[in-house]
Image (cartoon, rainbow, N blue to C red):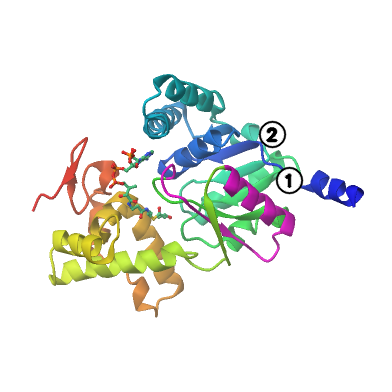
Amino acid sequence: VLKRSFSTSSVRQVIKNVTVIGGGLMGSGIAQVAAQGGNNVTLVEVNSELLKKAEASITNNLGRVAKKLYKDDPNGAKKFVDETQSRLKGSTNPSDAVKDSDLVVEAIVENMSVKHKLFKALDEAAPPKTLFASNTSSLSIGEIAAVVNRKDKFGGLHFFNPVPVMKLLEIVRIPEQSEETYQAFVAWGKAIRKTCVTCKDTPGFIVNRLLVPYIAEAIRMMERGDASPRDIDIAMKLGAGYPMGPIELADYVGHDTTASIIQGWHEKFPDNPLFNPCESTKRLVQEKKLGVKTGEGYYKYNNLRYWLEN
Ligand code: 3HC
C-alpha cells in the first residue's frame, strides 16, 4: 500500500512555477492570484511599458486585497504585499520565461493565429513537464491545442473579471487531456483559492454561453427603446439579484471582448439568433469607447466612480 501511494504521489504534477502570458486585465489578475497562492510567477508582456502598466495594476489590486484581509493590521498587510510581490517577476521573452515553468497560462488577444504562433514557440521552448492552459473566453481549446505536441497536457483555465475577487475557475477538458493534467489543474485551482467547475470544450463554456447572450439581449432591448439602460440595469440588480446590471457589466468586461466573442460565434453559428452582433456595440468599438477601461462605453466614467450621462 505504501509503495503504491508513493508511486502515485511521485507522478503527481505539483505546480510551483507559473508563467502568465499577457498582462492585460485578465493576465495581471491571474498572475496576482497565483503569486498570492504561493507560486513563483513570471508575467510576460510584449514590451517593458506594458509590463510596467500590468505591475502597477497588480500593486493597486494587491493593496485592495491586503486591506480586506488585514483590516486592522497594517504590518500584516505590508508583509502580505511584500511577500506576494517578491514571488512576481516580469519578462518580455516568452520562450525564456517558460524554461522552468510547471504551468503556462495564456491570456493574450483572442485571435487564433496569434495564439497558434505563441503556443508553437512555447511547445518548443518549454520542458516536457510544463502544462499549457488558455484563458480564452470564447475560442475552442481543442483548436488552440492543435499546434502543440503535448495535447495531453493542455486545457482551458477560464477566469472571471475582476480575477482577485471572482471565486470561479472553469476548467475545460479536451479529449486528449490526461487525467493527471486535469487533476493538476483542479489542485492548482484549489491552491489559488478558486472554486472549480468542469466542462467540455463547448462555445462559451458555462458562464459566457449564458452571460453573453443575456448581455446582448439587454443591449437589443435598449436599442429597441423598450427601456433605458439605467432601468434595465436597476431591474436586473433589484429584480434578479445580480451585482451589476447587464449594460454596466458590458462596459465593465469591455466591448472589444464581448463584440469579438459574439462575432466569432455568429460566424460559426449564423443561424443562432442568440449570437447576433449588436449594432450599438459595433459602433462603440469603432469609436474606441470600450467601456470602463477607456473611460466611456454605454456610460461615461471618471477616475473614481462612473455615472450615467443621459
Ligand atoms: N482587485 C482586488 N479587489 C477588488 C477589485 C480588483 N480588481 N475590484 C473590486 N475589488 C474589491 C474591492 O476592493 C471591494 O472590497 P471591500 O469589500 O473590502 O471594500 C470589493 O471588491 C467590492 O468592490 P466595490 O465596493 O468597488 O464594488 P462592488 O461591491 O460593486 O463590487 C464587483 C464590484 C466585485 C466587480 C461586483 O460588482 C461584481 O461582482 N460584478 C459582476 C462581475 C462579473 O460578473 N464578472 C464576470 C464578467 S464575465 C468574465 O469575466 C468572463 C470573460 O471571459 C468575459
Residue 178 percent location from the top left of the image: 73, 59
Q: Which residues are magenta?
A: 163-191
Q: Nearer the viewer, residue 230 or 89?
A: 230
In the picture provided, is 170 more to the left or to the right than 153?
left
Residue at left offset 48%, top offset 26%: 80
Residue at left offset 24%, top offset 48%: 289
Q: Is 108 part of what is drawn in magenta?
A: no
Q: What amino acid is at disc 2? A: Lys
Q: Can you identify the residue that label 2 sits on?
A: 99
Q: Is residue 288 above or below residue 172?
A: above
Badge 1: few (under 14), some or many (20 or more) residues near its Cα, within 10 Å? some
Q: Nearer the viewer, residue 235 or 223?
A: 235
Residue 67 percent location from the top left of the image: 37, 30
Q: Is residue 215 above or below residue 115?
A: below
Badge 2: few (under 14), some or many (20 or more) residues near its Cα, within 10 Å? some
Q: What amino acid is at disc 1? A: Gln
Which residue reaches farthest bottom?
Answer: 271
Q: Can you identify the residue that label 1 sits on?
A: 13
